[in-house]
Image: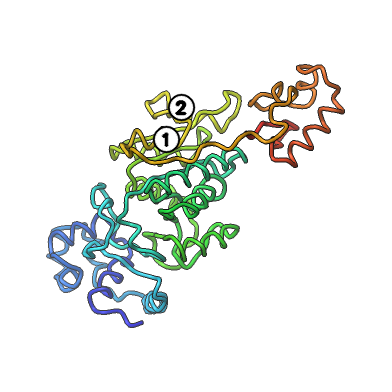
Amino acid sequence: MDLDEELEAWVALSLTPGLTDESFRRLLVAFGGPRAIINATRAELASVIPARAAAAVGTPAPREAMRAVGSWLDDPGNRVLTLADSVYPQALLQITDPPPLLYVKGRVELLNRRSFAVVGSRNGTRQGSDHAESFSRALSDAGLTIVSGLALGIDAAAHRGGLAGASSSIAVVGTGLDVVYPARNRDLAHELAQKGCIVSEFPLGTSPVAGNFPRRNRLISGLTCGCLVVEAALSSGSLITARLANDQGKDVFAIPGSIHSPLSKGCHSLIKQGAKLVETARDILEELGIAGVSVKPDEPAPEGENDALLDALGFDPCDIDTLSVRSGVSAELVSARLTQWEIDGLVEALPGGRYQRVR
């Protein structure tokens, strides 16, 4: 596809070396549009932005990069949105640093629907992933499009839940949209492109650079009316999303966990700082003022869940020897029962020979 002059000017400016998004926005305010910026003199530009950036404006954009955008737009499911587009996400116009351009694949209309962020650890437990998926599906069925970051673990589970619900899901990624990262989420990315939406502020071809992911988190929080953190260590990037959501005046929610689990530390820290502790999706819906929504109740416990040995396990991580002493059952029998429970989906094996109850 050949780009029209206006879009070509937007893309060319976005690819200008040394021109930050902040400078781009200042030029738009000063000159009104990208073509006027390109036609301005260097002195006029330098009166608005640093001289080095002004000197770079108007240099020809790499032909290969411009052709790549044109080829990418040959797919009718792909769009490049600019700040001047009526379908640009209105929620992002409320944050301090909206990106001048967004690359979008999939259902662009989702970007202007009420949405909610669900984020967490890339190394989440099975229980955490179950929580993320079930909460996300309930929230999606209640009318909230689920936004997350397409990472492994909690993010992927959140997307699956959102896609299974009525309001779908949006992935905000830290790469160009012609790059799927992580590769293990390729099938999920394809499903999002077909049934949901994937969005990036980064040019096509952008590889997964570490610094891009904290940056994209402001878009995850910016698109949404609130944020749920499911599992997070104290160093988790999902805490950045929660902090940004709080700074943007959004509601922050967290699911508590075991005091012994490193993946509960981040959630507990958020709760201490004022995040709302939640146990069900209904807690979130009521806080957001979404009333009268039917939330599917939890399923009855599977047969065997009320087993005395399982009760002795509790919900904290526990090794075989400790459970044997606690219950008075031989270590051999405990090991056999734990293996069967893992097959049945009642417990999850953790590093260090420990087990944790899933339900």
Name the side, left or right, on which 207 lies relative to 100.
right
Q: Residues within 10 Å of mark 1 (few under 14, many from 20)?
A: many
Quick check: can you spot residue 176?
Answer: yes
Identify residue type, mark 2.
Ser
**Real-space CA distance between mark 1 and mark 2, rounded to the nearest whole angstrom:** 22 Å
Name the side, left or right, on which 257 lies relative to 355.
left
- The N terminus sits in image quarter: bottom left
Quick check: can you spot residue 172?
Answer: no
**What is the quadrant of residue 23 in the picture?**
bottom left
Identify residue type, mark 1.
Arg
* Residue located beneath label 1 in the image: 282
- The C terminus sits in image quarter: top right
- Residue closest to the eye, 305 or 188: 305
Q: Residues within 10 Å of mark 2 (few under 14, many from 20)?
A: some
Query: Which of the numbered marks, if any, corresponds to residue 269?
Result: 2
Residue 349 percent location from the top left of the image: 71, 37
301 up-or-down from 133: above or below: above
